[in-house]
Each structure stands twice: as C-alpha cells, then as structure tokens.
Image: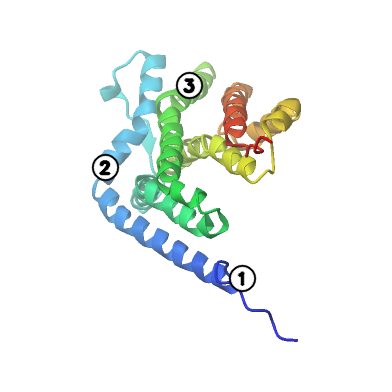
Amino acid sequence: MAIPATPPNKMSFWEHLSELRIRIFRSLLIVLVGFAVTYYFRFRLWDWAQRPFLEAMARQLGKPIAELQPWSFTSLTEPFFSLMRLSLWAAAVLCAPFLFYQLWAFIRPGLLPKERKLVIPFVFVTSGCFLLGAAFAYFSAFKFLGDILFQEAKNAGLRSNLNIDTYLDLFISTVLMTGVMFELPVLFYFLARFRMVTARWMLKYWRHATIVILIFSAFFTPGDVVVTTIFFSVVLLGLYFVSVVVAWLAEPREPKA
C-alpha cells in the first residue's frame, strides 16, 4: 500500500529530524562563536564567578577580600580546563536569545498561524526569564548558599583550601539550574495553550506540586543542607503560583454564544 503524501502545511517525521539537526548545528555554531569571545575574557569571568563566595568568606572571617587566597589546584591542566569550561557556559548564557529562537523555530510548524507571530515575545520572555533566574542565583541564591556553607565550615574549625574545579561545579550548576527554574511560567504557558493543563487544575493539585518540588529540591539543589532545600523549594513554589496566573491568561477562551 502506498504511503500517503505529507500535506503541504505539515512536516513528515524525517523532515522534523532534519529540521532538528539544522537547529542543533546552528546552536552549536553560535555558541562556538560566543566561546571565542568569552574565552578572551576568561580571567575576568573567573573574578566575577568567585566574587560571591569571596564576599561570603570575607563576611564570616571579617577580612577584606584582597587578603583571601582560598583557591588551589591539583594538576597543571586543571586551571586551563576549568577556565575553558567557565567560558563555554558563559557563551551559552550570552547566546541565550539565539538559542531560544532556534527552539521557537523548531516548534513553530506545530503552532497556529496567529501563534507563529509571537516569535519576538517568545524570544524576549524566555531569554528574560532565564537571565533573570541567572541574576537571581548570582546576586541572591549563591550569596545565601555561600553564607550557609562557609559558616558550616567555619563552625567545624576547618581551614579553606578550595579546589577551583569543584567550586565551578557548584557555581555553574546553581546559576544554570536557577535560570531553568525561572522558565517554569513559560512552560506552563504552552501547556495551557495546548489544553494540557488549566489554572483550575494547577490550583487543585498545588499540594501535590509542593511535594514534587520538595523532592526535586532535595535531590538537585546544590549543597547537602536542609536550608538550601527549603530556600529553593520556596522559590520554585513561588514560580509555580506565578505559572498559575500565566496559565489562566494563556487558556484558550471558548467563543461566547
């Protein structure tokens, strides 16, 4: 039996795979271009990345930042690869608007004609939410985390001799995860537009969502302390209720008779 032809306004499975390949290739290419820029400023990026923890350390010890020298490395290649990794992730953040545009271009064929015109608001909102989350992590979450973790070390009478690679693991995961967390309203916007969830349903099951958020925070938030789990759980729960409002605004309205 002959395979029916793909309608002109739809894409076949293989066309979707080809489109995905193109979008991934373009995303990798722009990140590599951004990496060439961020790697040039790698030492400034490192100064910027370490500052929140040095400020927390200075507050706990009562010393100026200039007198603190907590960093160490265990191999000659560690600083090189650590700064390269920091530069690569910085390039990904710098290129966030382009990456979100590629995401939009991939899902665009499945949208209605009037929804396809929302490309500029989509790129602006998704990029803004991600960068807002990253800024929140840097100026608030990581400051709070640094105070908690360093105070614990100080109370235990431990001397700082920190590995830069391990520190960057904590820093990058905190910033990126918080940026992704702030995309929650965008996710629920599309779920509501496609009638997969409603604001009423989200309010009905907010207790279940709270339990899921607590479990997620316990396993995926940095630091093995209860305080950080509670902190990120409160942030996520706040974003969940913001998403309820977004879902209510995004729900398709039935035409009045």
Which amino acid, by three-letter code, is at mark 2?
Answer: Phe
Give the residue at the far bottom of this rendering: 1
Q: Quadrant of the C terminus?
A: top right
Q: Earlier in the sequence, mark 2 or mark 3?
A: 2
Secondary structure beneath dot 1 equals helix
Name the side, left or right, on which 56 lies relative to 33.
right
Above or below, comparing residue 247 to residue 228 in the picture = below
- The CA span between labels 1 and 3 is 47 Å
When the figure is inspected, residue 95 is found, relative to residue 248, above or below; the finding is: below
- Mark 2 is surrounded, within 10 Å at the Cα level, by few (under 14), some (14 to 19) or many (20 or more) other residues, namely some
Q: Residue furthest front?
A: 257
Q: Give the residue at x 63% y 32%.
A: 217
Percent across and percent down for residue 17 are 56, 69
Q: Which mark is residue 144?
A: 3
Q: Which residue is mark 2?
A: 43
In the foreground, 202 or 165: 202
Say which of marks 2 and 1 sits in front.
1
Asked whether the beta carbons under mark 1 and mark 3 sit within 8 Å of each other, the answer is no
